[in-house]
Amino acid sequence: MERKWMIYSEPPTRVTNGLYLSINKIGELTLGRGSYEALGQPEAVYLMYDPDNDLIGLRKTERLMPNAFALRAKNDSGNYVVRAKPLCVKHDLRFDGTVQFVETSVEGETLVAHLLKTRPVRKRSNPNRKRSK
């Protein structure tokens, strides 16, 4: 019997460029280790928004600069968090839950994420949590 293979033509769902950026419903942006290192391991970032192209951007800056948003380590995972709620409120950016930006890249010194290209992040169950009976 002859096989009639068709190659799946869609890209894999996994982000392969090593850049991870997500945002939750309270406006916390989480940068993966690769994204943090791509920005040069900053203490703070400028938050930027491009309404014409539906993009957000993060650019490295010094912590004491005006309009600088501090990055803080998120436990021992290598991830970093920046509280972007002021940006979300000002530009009416809303998210129902945590979403990962699927199209993320570095342009010069800026980490760029496309707001319309996201996917939901599934919550992992906590194995240490006690179940109620």
Image: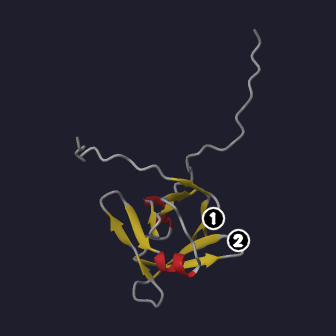
Residue 71 percent across, percent down from the top left = 40, 74
Q: Quadrant of the N terminus?
A: top right
> Can the viewer see residue 13?
yes
Q: Residue at x 57, y 78 (%)?
A: 48
Quarter location, residue 82? bottom left
Callout 2 amino acid: Asn
* Secondary element type, mark 2: loop
Q: Are marks 1 and 2 in contact (CB under 8 Å)?
A: yes
Q: Is residue 64 left or right of residue 14?
A: left
Q: Which mark is residue 53?
A: 2
76 over 2 or under it: above or below: below
* Secondary element type, mark 1: strand
Quarter location, residue 91? bottom right
Q: Residue at x 77, y 12 (%)?
A: 2
Quarter location, residue 118? bottom right
Q: Is residue 102 left or right of residue 29?
A: right
Q: Is residue 44 left or right of residue 114?
A: left
Q: CA distance from mark 1 to mark 2?
A: 8 Å
- Rendering colour mode: secondary structure
The disc, 1 or 2, on the residue closer to the chain's N-terminal end is 2
Question: Which residue bears the numbered disc 1?
Answer: 114
Name the one closer to the observer, 113 or 123: 123
Callout 1 amino acid: His
Q: Categorize mark 2 by other alpha carbons within 10 Å: few (<14), some (14-19), many (20+).
A: few
Name the one closer to the observer, 43 or 128: 128
Q: Categorize mark 1 by other alpha carbons within 10 Å: few (<14), some (14-19), many (20+).
A: some
> Can the viewer see residue 20?
no
Give the farthest residue toward the front.
Answer: 133
